[in-house]
Image (spheres, rainbow, N blue to C red):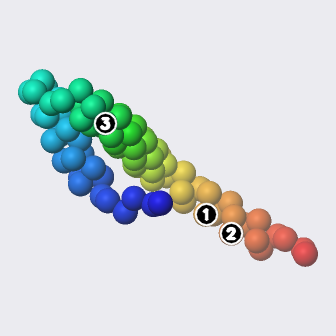
Amino acid sequence: MKDNKSFEERLERLKIIVAGLERGDLPLEEGVALFKEGQALAKNCADQLQKAANEVKIVGDGLIEDFEAKVENEDMTDDS
C-alpha cells in the first residue's frame, strides 16, 4: 500500500513518536511498535531528503539543461 503522506506529515509523526519514546512510560510492546514505525519513518524521510538534494544539485549544476539539449540533438540526428 502506497503512503500518500507528505514529508512534513511524516516528520511530524516521527516527532510525536520520539517524544513518546523519550517519556519512557510506554508498555514494552507499544514502545517496540512505535520504535519500528519511527525507524521506517526516519528511513523514508532520509530517502526523500536525499532525493530532493539530488534534484536540487542536478538543477543547480545545470545538468537538466545539458541533458535536455543532448536528447534534443540526438532526436534531430536520429535516422530511424
Q: Decide: marks 1, 2 in contact (CB < 8 A)?
A: yes
Secondary structure beneath label 2? helix
Measure how far apart labels 1 and 2 are at the Cα level: 6 Å
**What residue lies at 32% left-to-right and 59% top-to-bottom?**
5
Give the crowd class for mark 2: few <14, some 14-19, many >=20 residues within 10 Å.
few
**What residue lies at 24% left-to-right and 26% top-to-bottom?**
28
Type of amino acid at the residue the image marks with label 3: Ala
Eyeballing the image, is 9 above or below 23? Answer: below
Q: Position of residue 63 (x, y in %)?
A: 54, 51
Q: Position of residue 18 (x, y in %)?
A: 18, 33
**Which residue position holds label 3?**
33
Type of amino acid at the residue the image marks with label 2: Glu
Measure how far apart labels 3 and 2 are at the Cα level: 51 Å
Residue 45 visible from this viewpoint: yes
Please give the count of numbered marks on the rendered protein.
3
**What residue lies at 24% left-to-right and 35% top-to-bottom?**
30
